[in-house]
Image (spheres, grey):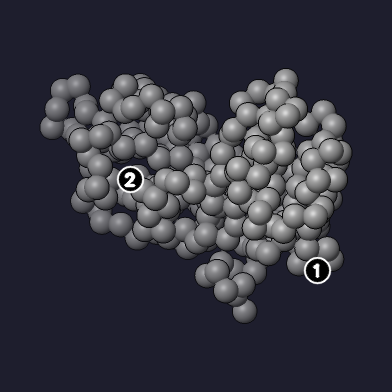
Amino acid sequence: MKFGTNLEPGTISIIQLAWSRLLGLDDDAMAAGGRNRIYREDNSAPLLSFVSLFGKEALVGPTWALDEAKSLPGAELARHSTLLSMSRPRGGRGLGEAFLYFCDTLPTFPDDGPPVSSDTEHALALERLCPPDDVAEVGLSAMEHTCVLVDDSSDPLLPLAGAGYDIWEGILAHLGVLTAPAERQRGRASYAASIAVEESMAAGLIPQWRARTDNTASQRTALSAGFVRVGSQTSVVLEGGAA
């Protein structure tokens, strides 16, 4: 029986394992059963992070943060404003609040879409067409694997949209998608994402999508590409930490 998220039980178990490792917890910490909230004290942590995943919660950070958080409900800790308020007296800086999405179903897309390039130069060319904030958020050209939709009727080839992924813990394919402003709202992002999903699943990875809670376009693209929202991640950078 599925978890109620359209993800297979085996997929859920693997995601829980990956995130347990990402958070520095025991391998079974985020699995079903046991405590609903887990704390990991790390007084040298560069981030204060709260993760909610399949009904389990985890908070990683310094002792003072964990002590303060124990009296707060999960819905409160998931708010970026809460973690920022807790950490600001100690130099905390905003990083973000995002939803976590995953998928384990191969996508379907038309065979007559634009040609696809894996050339890093096309990813860089696409970034030059996009707003700096979007480029910084996605980091497409720096990803381990990229695919860029191109218009082959132009010379040089014109990038339309691209997707890529980094491999986390040898398990998750953490995706990012970037679309040229002139090509937005034309299904380009979903198409590029579907190609990246297919490639990552063929490599035995589970695709992961992270969308800021204020980025409705990214959330819509995730859903249209077959992803299912199952949790959230909220983080702030602590004094001396790197963004």
Q: Residues within 10 Å of mark 1 (few under 14, many from 20)?
A: few
Amino acid type indicated by mark 1: Gly
The residue shown at (69%, 57%) is 74
Q: Residue furthest bottom?
A: 1
Asked whether, in this view, residue 144 is left or right of residue 111, the answer is: right
Write down the residue under mark 1.
33
The residue shown at (66%, 54%) is 76
Q: Nearer the viewer, residue 156 or 160?
A: 160
The residue shown at (24%, 47%) is 185
Q: Are marks 1 and 2 in contact (CB under 8 Å)?
A: no
The residue shown at (38%, 54%) is 220
Q: Nearer the viewer, mark 1 or mark 2?
A: 1
Q: Where on the picture, by quarter, is residue 118? A: top left
Write down the residue under mark 2.
189
Q: Residues within 10 Å of mark 2 (few under 14, many from 20)?
A: many
Q: Nearer the viewer, residue 204 or 90?
A: 90
Q: Position of residue 42 (x, y in %)?
A: 84, 36
Q: Position of residue 79 (x, y in %)?
A: 61, 49
Q: Where on the picture, by quarter, is residue 57? A: bottom right
Total number of numbered discs in the rendering: 2
Amino acid type indicated by mark 2: Ala
Q: Position of residue 195 (x, y in %)?
A: 38, 48
On residue 12, the disc is none
